[in-house]
Image: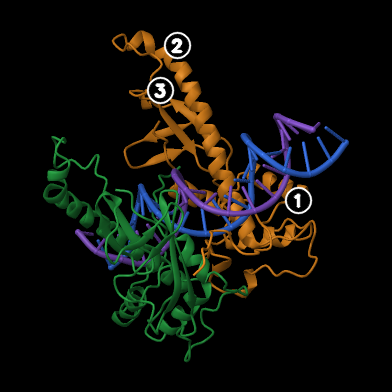
Chain colours: A green, B orange, C blue, D purple
Amino acid sequence: MQVLKREKMARPTRWSPTPEQLMFLEEMYRKGLRNPNATQIQSITCHLSSFGKIEGKNVFYWFQNHKARDRQKLKKKLLAQMNQQQILVQYPIDAHSTTTTSNSNNNNTLFHCPSTDHYQICPGGLLQEGGIKEASSQVMTYVYPMDLSRSTDQNVENCMIRPYGKDWIVMMNITPNNLPYCVDRPLKTLPLFPITTTDDLKDQTTSSTSLSL
Amino acid sequence: MQVLKREKMARPTRWSPTPEQLMFLEEMYRKGLRNPNATQIQSITCHLSSFGKIEGKNVFYWFQNHKARDRQKLKKKLLAQMNQQQILVQYPIDAHSTTTTSNSNNNNTLFHCPSTDHYQICPGGLLQEGGIKEASSQVMTYVYPMDLSRSTDQNVENCMIRPYGKDWIVMMNITPNNLPYCVDRPLKTLPLFPITTTDDLKDQTTSSTSLSL
DNA sequence: GCAAATTAATGATTTATTCAAG
DNA sequence: CTTGAATAAATCATTAATTTGC
């Protein structure tokens, strides 16, 4: 019997995005795309196949990984930042605390705007201008730092955020009428099954999370 | 602006397996199928559609969930068992320890055979006959209880299946001669796919883990 | 017996972790 | 070290079982 390792045997090579492909993907991401659905993946794939070999799953994984690792970085960065702030801000207030650098009882809250993955620190969970506008126990209205509501590329309207357990739920209506569509090589990566897309809204509502720090 | 809730609006209903479908799936599972590939999922789906409405992703999710929850149960059961054993076996050895029921410094290792999801306790991480044959830090060779490692000529399919929202992405190398085709009420009793395991082997390489308890 | 209420199972998604290619 | 690829774990949400008060 032979020793098996995790390596796959003789799989050609893994996809590596061309500069053009990467640029396009990053642009999509920058514009707020996080969880592309099957149709969007298909369109993107089709479009990007003009620039080189690519499959739908490459696009899928790219967004998944990019989102996760982006969040990782942001989390780490803001964690440090919050520690910093705690020294400057919370020390005078929290005079009892002897350990000023510890964030074990840090009551800051990190708010998250899912469509852009922007974060904002609210010390003590209090309100902050441009952040949470109204905070009742059940409903919150979020005002974006930048006005995304008039974005033409990605029509975001009727955005709504509300707490859900530890997490945040944001609902927004997105009208995706400007998906890149394929012109030159349309049929290359068509999926085998018919697909329907109704989960733009769902996308935005379910994937929102606030980081628990 | 109205308050939206997380509930999906009027999504038809979630799949619930009929007794026949469930029996078949469990039989497959019992025989060792754990990570059906896209082709297998399609075949199973096609076959089971004789008994009621079903989609590929249902099959996919079923195996994923069944495997995970099976493992959960086994882990919990064996954890209790190991605590039991610890009292009987480790107490005389570990005379210093005052808390004999604690498993915080329990050095037992739970080995796992991916193809069958059998578990085996190895006290102190030592070897045991019929189980782990050789265990270095990186490589393990497992001796199967039954010879599932014999794979037929089923070529390693470079296909993957991926649920995405309500949609379903399937990527595979389209070589039409190994695509199972689905006529309406197909092939009721056909042994549609080899349960012989090209992905047992894959399984073993990818998902073999020893649970750290 | 029988619904309403509660709890347990389990289908469906998302997130975290892992491994290896380059 | 970065990141594509893949799987496992955690979580959410809905259905089925079960209990409970009448």
Decide which of tag 3 and tag 1 comes sooner along the chain.
1
Classify mark 2: helix, strand or loop: helix
* Three-letter code for the amino acid on which mark 2 is drawn: Leu
Name the residue rendered at 67%, 67% in the picture. Answer: B180
Of the image marks 2 and 1, the number of the one nearer the N terminus:
1
The residue type indicated by label 1 comes to Thr
The residue beneath circle 1 is B18
Q: Are marks 2 and 1 on the same chain?
A: yes
- Quarter of the image where the N terminus of chain A is located: top left
Specify whether residue B114 is in view. yes
> Quick check: B121 left or right of B170?
left
Residue A133: quarter of image: bottom left
In terms of sequence position, does the residue under pointer 3 or pointer 2 come before the other? 2
In front: B170, or A92?
A92
Q: CA distance from mark 2 to mark 1?
A: 45 Å
Residue at 33% in and 70% down: A144
* Camera-side residue of A174 and B199: A174
Co-location on one chain, circles 3 and 1: yes
Dot 2, how many residues are within 10 Å of its Cα: few (below 14), some (14-19), or many (20+)? few
The chain carrying label 2 is: B
**Number of callouts in the render?**
3
Mark 3 falls on what kind of element?
helix
Which amino acid type is shown beneath numbered disc 3?
Pro
User: On the same chain: label 3 and label 2?
Assistant: yes
Please give the chain letter of the residue carrying mark 3: B
Crowding at mark 3 (Cα within 10 Å: few <14, some 14-19, many 20+) = some
Expressed as whole percent of the image width and height from the top left, the position of residue B62 reads 61, 51
In front of the other: label 3 or label 2?
2
- Residue A198 at x, y = what percent? 57, 72
Q: Which residue is mark 2?
A: B88
Residue at horizontal 51 percent and vertical 69 percent from the top: A201
**Residue at image mark 3:** B123
